[in-house]
Amino acid sequence: EKEYIEVFGTDYDTPDGTCIRDYIHVNDLADAHLKAVDYLMKGGATECFNLGTGLGLSVREILETAEKVTGKKIPVRYGPRREGDPPRLIANPKKAKEILGWEARCKDAGAIVETAWKWMTGPRRGHY
């Protein structure tokens, strides 16, 4: 476990200055993989898909959500931008919906964080 979370950059052209990313629930990701395997098994061509919700949340928003879900203050250290980090990365899952019939069902950041938190604090503490 880390002493703190490092956030790289607070001066991006985003509402709160931190990078915006498309966060996806692990169950949705697993479902997409199963649909992709089924597609291939039925003779589908090899494809690349963007998997995500199509929505973006900032790093700061995710940290605030994590604090609400866990009830714990998360120590954060703000550092400079990392070279090459784009301000926004948001998936366009349209192709996955059209070809695989897949779309993210969980678009709620709280539910995404809560699932990860339960896994990390459960009986196996994040291990299989």
Image: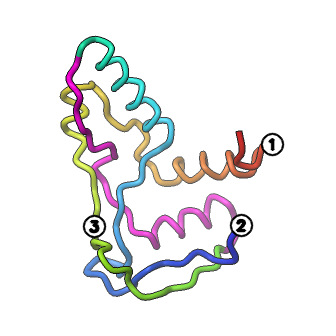
Residue pictured at 81% horizontal, 42% vertical: 123
Q: Which mark is residue 1?
A: 2
- Location of residue 22 with respect to 51 vertically, above or below: below
- Mark 1–mark 3 distance (CA, rounded to whole Å): 36 Å
Q: Secondary structure at mark 1?
A: loop
**Which quarter of the rendering shows the N terminus?**
bottom right
Queried whether the magenta region covers residue 51, the answer comes back as: yes
Highlighted range, magenta: 44-73
Tell me the crowding category of disc 1: few under 14, some 14 to 19, or many 20 or more residues within 10 angstroms, Cα based. Answer: few
Q: Position of residue 7 (x, y in %)?
A: 48, 78
Q: Secondary structure at mark 2?
A: loop
Q: Amino acid at mark 1?
A: Pro
Q: Amino acid at mark 3?
A: Arg
Q: Which mark is residue 88?
A: 3
In contact (CB < 8 Å): disc 1 and disc 2: no
Q: Is residue 114 left or right of residue 28?
A: right
Q: Which mark is residue 39?
A: none
Q: Position of residue 117 (x, y in %)?
A: 65, 52
Tell me the crowding category of disc 3: few under 14, some 14 to 19, or many 20 or more residues within 10 angstroms, Cα based. Answer: some
* Most distant residue in the top direction: 42
* Nearest to viewer (mark 1 / mark 2): 2
- Mark 1–mark 2 distance (CA, rounded to whole Å): 17 Å
Compare residues 96 and 63 and report the one nearer the observer. Answer: 96
Residue topped by disc 1: 123
Residue pictured at 40% horizontal, 30% vertical: 33
